[in-house]
Amino acid sequence: GALSGEDTEQVMQFVECGKMTLDQNTDILLFTDGATPPRWNDLVRNDEQTAYVALVRQKGLWGLYRTIRYEENKDKDHTAFPRYKTHDDFTVVWIKVRN
């Protein structure tokens, strides 16, 4: 969902709280929808998430950005990947936890 000035009650349905043990080497990725390749919609399946993390590790953030922009630019009419605008925001926070 998009959070754009909604009141606290509306926003809370999107917030999850909890704990996780980080006793292994772990990558934590926080990203906007514009930081996913257009061919991948929501990354809800585990195999999609695994493939996304592998892509980030392989290409790095700059390579990921260039890959996404290349795919978006190839589809200027927005027919292969329906969307409102050619480019979406691209924001990624990549936290590498190393023990």
Image (cartoon, rainbow, N blue to C red):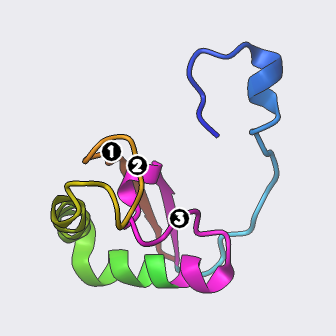
Which numbered disc flags the more N-terminal residue, 1 or 2? 2
| 76 to 6, vertically: above or below | below
Q: Which residues fall within the magenta stretch?
A: 26-50
Q: Inspect the image, locate mark 1, and give the three-letter code of the amino acid beneath it.
A: Asp
Amino acid type of the residue that numbered disc 2 sits on in the rendered structure:
Arg
Which numbered mark, 3 or 2, is in the foreground of this view?
2
Disc ID at residue 83: 2
> At x 21% / y 70%, what residue is drawn?
67
Q: Amino acid at mark 3?
A: Asn
Q: Which mark is residue 41?
A: 3
User: For the residue labelled by badge 1, is the local secondary structure a helix, a strand or a loop?
Assistant: loop
Name which residue lies at 49% across and 61% down.
29
Q: Nearer the viewer, residue 48 or 56?
A: 48
Asked whether the beta carbons under mark 1 and mark 2 sit within 8 Å of each other, the answer is: yes
Q: Residues within 10 Å of mark 1 (few under 14, many from 20)?
A: some
Residue 31 lies within the magenta run: yes
Residue 49 image-quadrant placement = bottom right
Residue in the image at 24% along x and 60% along y: 72
The quarter of the displayed image where residue 12 is located: top right
Give the residue number, with chain letter if any, for mark 1.
88
Q: Residues within 10 Å of mark 2 (few under 14, many from 20)?
A: few
Q: Is residue 39 magenta?
A: yes
